Amino acid sequence: EIKTLSGNDPMVVYARKFGECDGRGADLEEAFTVLEKAVGAGSASACRAHCWFLQWGSIAGNTLLSFYQGRLVGDAKSGSNVLFEIAFAAYYTPCYVLISATSLLLKALPSKVPNVVSSALGCVLTCVASIWIVPLGVVGLATAPFRKK
């Protein structure tokens, strides 16, 4: 059985608010408290993590597109840093190639697959992306004590 969510589902409401607030702010914290009461702490935390994962994907994808469709054709964004763009593209392009290849494979599957198959594919995509996310998270964690508060 495939689960569908309505627009009034607490997770959908929170995800929308997350998008509106870019993952920050008092309104979002209030929405998270409502979500936590509705679905429990574990499911609420998983929903928030998923939202951050999608936010990262959106920002990283837009940054890569800006590099490939802007910088490389002579139309760089004002104020952009060429060294950052090159380093970012060098680091994340392999990740996006793998995710794009996986997406093409998904298109070959029937539109309605059992939940276990859908969940397994979600786990695979998350693991693939985490290969690029986790090292930067470790660096961020290691340097956190040295940052200004």
Image (cartoon, rainbow, N blue to C red):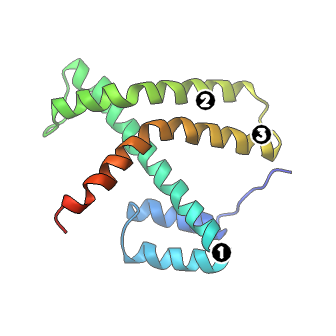
Label annotation for residue 89? none
Badge count: 3
Question: Disc 2 residue type?
Answer: Ser
Q: In the figure, residue 79 lies in which quadrant?
A: top left
- 144 lies above or below 84: below
Residue position marked by numbered label 3 in the rendering: 117
Left or right, 114 with reference to 77:
right
Left or right, 94 with reference to 76:
right
Inter-mark Cα distance, 2 to 3 = 14 Å
Find residue 48 and report its horizontal and vertical position in percent. Answer: 52, 62
Inter-mark Cα distance, 2 to 1 = 31 Å
Label annotation for residue 40? 1
Residue beneath the point at 68% across and 38% down: 121
Residue position marked by numbered label 2 in the rendering: 103
Find residue 65 and report its horizontal and vertical position in percent. Answer: 35, 30
How many residues crowd around disc 1 within 10 Å: few (fewer than 14), some, or many (20 or more)? few
- 109 lies above or below 42: above
Which circle, 2 or 1, is nearer the viewer?
Answer: 1
